[in-house]
Image (tube, rainbow, N blue to C red):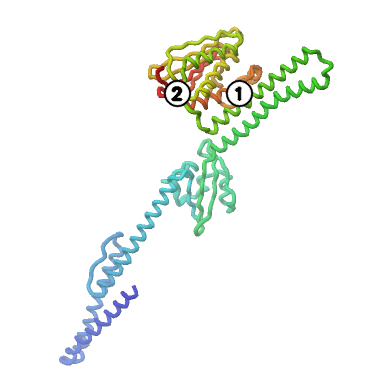
């Protein structure tokens, strides 16, 4: 640029010098007045030419971006060429910045977290889609609006105005039902703020489940331990005061309670393996008829002759999966049927092939039944319709939770039909991909 300016000045001096030399012959031939007149006319012409070129340059600056620069000769041509070069460089820089900004915005849009920029005055300058969802905003209408006028959560307003952003804020979103957000404000640049938001609703639910789980396990283990401790304390304090039959009865009851704790611990370990996503056991071909006969015998033994246990087989087939897990799921359903069916009742287990190539297993009883409001929660850990009866029958409250995870691993689904006093029917449907012919 400096060289170009030097060239312009040198060109101007050369033009004036030439004009003076052109005026000298007129000055000698016609006198000073005519020589001066020619020199002045030349200056006016040069000035008019410069003003014209300057006007062209100013007119170009008012044209849309990308309009070609005017052409000229001499030092104005050199000046125009320099302007064009600098303009081209500016366009290239602008394009690079625009491309970089576009990539940054695309990356911000793809983020699972909300990203929002605030000015020093607290107005919204930019936000991604996730931030719109988190705060209930609309980019088309809310850009430029004060953030605190749109998000009126008192905790958020206080946090934003406090200017102390060392720790994130955990808040419940007002417009997003059920959303719990972790919000962090990060100052940057010249009095600007980056607001990051993350949906931690699932983490909060998991933490609640963890606390409930620990509380439930503690409660479930405390009850049999209290009973065992009471029996042992009674026997140790007055062993000589009890006859053989009473001692035997206490020991049998203590043994039942220890068995209940053992079953609870076994179920907890099984559920832990299923819930932590441990690799599934090696799959094998399970003969459905053999599995059904095995479960039928176990159900009869569990019933001890108190119920009529029947089996229906409508077609066979090979079920591909973990035999151990499939046996556990079916046995949990049949044992529940036995426990919740009064003496003299009927329990039916069955299997049939569906027309689409899949398979369907069911357990049906004429027991106490389940109210409709309880059915959606049956597979929750430790959820019991009747806690007192469940403890009497030796249930751990984890059986159906285990069944749910096993069926999920085998791409199966379970349906429940039940009415109080009319019994229940649990149906498990396996997809065609899991079933092959014998």
Locate the C terminus and report the quarter of the image it occupies. top left
Q: Quick one: 259 or 282, which is closer to the camera?
A: 282
Q: Residues within 10 Å of mark 2 (few under 14, many from 20)?
A: some
What is the spatial separation of the Cα atoms under label 1 and label 2, in whole angstroms?
Answer: 28 Å
Q: Position of residue 16 (x, y in %)?
A: 25, 83
Locate the N terminus and report the quarter of the image it occupies. bottom left
Q: Position of residue 367 (x, y in %)?
A: 57, 12
Q: Position of residue 318 (x, y in %)?
A: 43, 19
Work out whether 419 lies above or below 70: above
Q: Quick one: 156 or 145, which is closer to the camera?
A: 156
What's the mark number on residue 397?
A: 1
Q: Residues within 10 Å of mark 1 (few under 14, many from 20)?
A: many
What's the mark number on residue 320?
A: 2
Work out whether 293 lies above or below 108: above
Work out whether 75 lies above or below 158: below
Q: Quick one: 411 or 178, which is closer to the camera?
A: 411
Work out whether 242 lies above or below 80: above
Q: Position of residue 158 (x, y in %)?
A: 59, 48
Could you tell me which residue is drawn at 22 percent across and 78 percent down? Answer: 45
Could you tell me which residue is drawn at 41 percent across and 48 percent down? Answer: 106
Q: Is residue 127 left or right of residue 206?
A: left
Could you say whether the residue bearing mark 2 is in a helix, strand or loop?
strand
Q: Quick one: 415 or 165, which is closer to the camera?
A: 415
């Amino acid at each position: 640029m400096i060289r170009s300016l030097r060239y312009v000045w040198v060109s101007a001096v050369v033009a004036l010098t030439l004009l003076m030399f052109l005026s000298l012959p007129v000055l000698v031939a016609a006198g000073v007045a005519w020589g001066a007149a020619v020199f002045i006319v030349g200056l006016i012409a040069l000035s008019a030419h410069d003003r014209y070129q300057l006007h062209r340059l100013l007119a170009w600056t008012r044209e849309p971006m990308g309009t070609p620069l005017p052409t000229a000769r001499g030092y104005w041509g050199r000046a125009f060429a320099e302007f064009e070069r600098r303009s081209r460089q500016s366009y290239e820089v602008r394009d690079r910045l625009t491309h970089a900004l576009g990539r940054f915005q695309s990356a911000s849009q793809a983020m699972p977290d909300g990203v929002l920029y605030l000015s020093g005055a607290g107005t919204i300058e930019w936000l991604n889609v996730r931030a719109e969802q988190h705060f209930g905003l609309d980019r088309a209408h809310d850009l430029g609006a004060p953030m605190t006028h749109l998000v009126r959560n008192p905790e958020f307003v206080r946090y934003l105005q406090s200017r102390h952003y060392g720790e994130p804020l955990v808040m419940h979103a007002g417009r997003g039902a059920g959303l719990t957000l972790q919000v962090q404000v990060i100052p940057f640049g010249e009095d600007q703020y980056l607001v990051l938001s993350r949906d931690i609703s699932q983490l909060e639910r998991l933490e609640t489940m963890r606390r409930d789980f620990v509380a439930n396990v503690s409660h479930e283990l405390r009850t049999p331990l209290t009973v065992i401790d009471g029996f042992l304390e009674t026997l140790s304090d007055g062993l000589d005061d009890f006859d053989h039959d009473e001692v035997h009865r206490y020991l049998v009851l203590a043994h039942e309670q220890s068995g209940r704790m053992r079953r609870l611990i076994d179920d907890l370990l099984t559920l832990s393996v299923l819930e932590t996503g441990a690799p599934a056991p090696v799959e094998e071909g399970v003969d459905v008829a053999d599995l059904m006969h095995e479960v039928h015998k176990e159900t009869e033994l569990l019933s001890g002759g108190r119920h009529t246990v029947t089996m229906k087989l409508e077609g066979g087939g090979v079920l591909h999966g973990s035999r151990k897990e499939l046996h556990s799921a079916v046995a949990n359903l049949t044992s529940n049927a036995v426990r919740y069916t009064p003496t003299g009742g009927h329990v039916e287990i069955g299997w049939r092939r569906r027309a689409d190539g899949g398979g369907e297993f069911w357990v049906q009883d004429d027991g106490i039944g389940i109210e409709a409001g309880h059915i959606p929660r049956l597979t929750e850990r430790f959820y019991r319709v009747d806690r007192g009866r469940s403890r009497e029958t030796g249930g751990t409250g984890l059986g159906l939770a285990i069944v749910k995870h096993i069926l999920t691993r085998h791409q199966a689904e379970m349906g429940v039909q039940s009415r109080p006093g009319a019994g229940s029917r649990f149906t498990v449907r396996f997809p065609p991909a899991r079933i092959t012919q014998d």
